Amino acid sequence: MSLMATEDRPRAEAPRPALRELVKRRRAELGLSYVKLAIRCVDPETGAQTVKDSWLHRLETGLKVLPPEYPGIVGLAVGLQVPLHVVQAAAGEQFFGISTVQAESTRARALMARADRLTPEQVDALAAFLDVVPPGDK
């Protein structure tokens, strides 16, 4: 009987390697070694290096690493030459299971910011409305 109960439980989902994949892809695109990338990962205000090459290696090869703190995320954005929100989203997804939605337009971001003020019923109604609205041309 206890075997049956164990089988019925959903399996824990493995963490997504979002930051690992971002680092791997951008490092390859930039043609950098771990050492050269780490040297580029600096605090833009102080110039202090925020990430070690050994951490980058462990991250990219799938070994256990501690989540980066904010200065490390900022440094990674500088070193990888990507917007800060891209690194933040990848780190949040990989280490904390946070899935974010990014919007390019100011209008879309403003609408998303207001969504927190809606009741659950209003969210459901809005979602139902959006499901039937045909997509517009950009």
Image: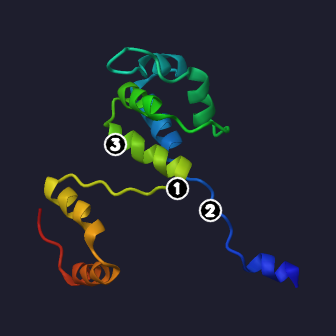
Displayed quadrant of residue 2: bottom right
Residue at x-position 73% and y-position 80%: 8
Amino acid type of the residue tagged 3 in the rendering: His
Residue at x-position 53% and y-position 40%: 20
Position of 133 compared to 84: left or right?
A: left
Q: Secondary structure at mark 1?
A: loop
Image disc number at residue 70? none
Amino acid type of the residue tagged 2 in the rendering: Glu
Amino acid type of the residue tagged 1 in the rendering: Gly
Q: Is residue 28 visible?
A: no
Residue 95, image x and y in percent? 55, 47
Q: Is residue 85 above or below residue 80?
A: below
Q: Secondary structure at mark 2?
A: loop
Query: Which of disc 3 and disc 2 is earlier in sequence?
Result: 2
Q: Is residue 101 above or below residue 27?
A: below
Position of 108 compared to 34: left or right?
A: left
Q: CA distance from mark 1 to mark 3?
A: 16 Å
| Residue topped by disc 3 | 85
| Residue topped by disc 1 | 97
Displayed quadrant of residue 87: top left
Q: Is residue 134 above or below residue 48?
A: below
Residue 59, image x and y in percent? 59, 35
Q: Quadrant of the C terminus?
A: bottom left
Image disc number at residue 13? 2
